[in-house]
Image (tube, helix red, strand yellow):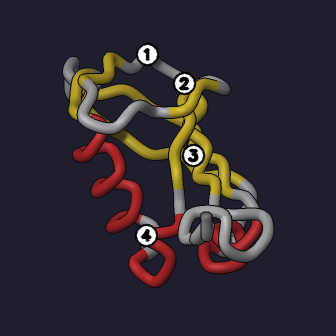
């Protein structure tokens, strides 16, 4: 690990935990990166392609804003959160 990387704890919930097979894992990751790059790194590192369009990320209990630049610190906690009940992200509302 070089000086531009940190060790983060990746926390998995619900379907993500089932797919990965553990509650949490460590991951070496760039200190500064885009939210899209963080998302891609986690999806690929933990083979979460099957739920890619259903998950959101949170860093230290704050949801990651799309199209943002993140500056991470050693031992940050990154949560991988899929919908806890069906349809959370694809729900259609009829007016």
Q: Which residue is mark 2?
A: 76
Callout 4: helix, strand or loop?
helix
| Picture quarter with the C terminus | bottom right
Residue 41 position within the rendered picture, expressed as x and y whole percent measured from the top left:
30, 54
Q: Residues within 10 Å of mark 1 (few under 14, many from 20)?
A: some
Callout 2: helix, strand or loop?
loop
First in sequence: mark 3 or mark 4? 3
Quarter of the image where one finds residue 88: bottom right
Residue visible at 66% across and 26% down in the picture: 61
In-image side of 44 versus 17 (left or right): left
| Picture quarter with the N terminus | top left
Residue visible at 35% across and 51% down in the picture: 39
Residue 15 position within the rendered picture, expressed as x and y whole percent measured from the top left:
69, 74
In-image side of 74 versus 78 (left or right): left
Q: Which residue is mark 1?
A: 73
Residue 31 position within the rendered picture, expressed as x and y whole percent measured from the top left:
29, 23
Closer to the camera, 29 or 79?
79
Residue visible at 20% across and 22% down in the picture: 4
């Amino acid at each position: 690990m070089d000086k531009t990387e940190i060790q983060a704890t990746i926390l998995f919930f619900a379907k993500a935990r089932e797919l990965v097979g553990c509650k949490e894992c460590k991951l070496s990751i760039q200190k500064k990166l885009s939210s899209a790059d963080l998302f891609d790194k986690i999806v690929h590192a933990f083979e979460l392609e099957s739920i890619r369009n259903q998950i959101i990320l949170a860093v230290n209990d704050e949801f990651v804003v799309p199209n943002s630049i993140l500056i991470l610190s050693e031992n940050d906690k990154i949560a991988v959160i899929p919908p806890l009940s069906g349809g959370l992200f694809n729900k259609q509302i009829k007016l």
